[in-house]
Image (cartoon, rainbow, N blue to C red):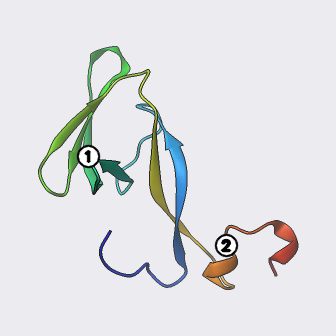
Amino acid sequence: MRGAALSGAVFSPVEITSASVQRGDVIQVGGQQCRVTDLFQLPGGAKRLVFDSGELLTIHTGSRFIALRLVRVRGGDPTHALSTRRYRR
């Protein structure tokens, strides 16, 4: 992934399926990180993902991936955004 994270935001790893994938998720495919720019619902619960490079990927209901998702942090230090509540202020 090129570029720095936005101030007040961090990328968090999340498990995604065809039901939970969102625009902006970053999925590693073939060793290359690809950002989802658009998605289309297909029959049977599958989705076709469109990446910023123009490539397409179809994921089915049984497919599971780990993606990076941008998590916005309100106030405080983004480095502690994913730490336990004890360290948050």
Identify the secondary structure beneath mark 2.
loop
Residue 4: name its quadrant. bottom left
Nearer to us in this view, 60 or 8: 60
Q: Which residue is identified by label 1?
A: 30
Amino acid type, label 2 = Ala
Q: Residue at x 88, y 72 (%)?
A: 86
When the figure is inspected, residue 51 is found, relative to residue 19, above or below; the finding is: below
Amino acid type, label 1 = Gly
Q: Residues within 10 Å of mark 1 (few under 14, many from 20)?
A: few
When the figure is inspected, residue 42 is found, relative to residue 6, above or below; the finding is: above
The percent coordinates of residue 36 (x first, y second) are 29, 51
Left or right placement of residue 16 versus residue 86 in this view: left
Eye-nearest disc, 2 or 1:
1
The tag on residue 17 is none
Quadrant of the rendering where the N terminus is positioned: bottom left
Identify the secondary structure beneath mark 1.
loop
Q: Residue at x 33, y 24 (%)?
A: 46
Q: Residue at x 19, y 57 (%)?
A: 52
Q: Which residue is identified by label 2?
A: 81
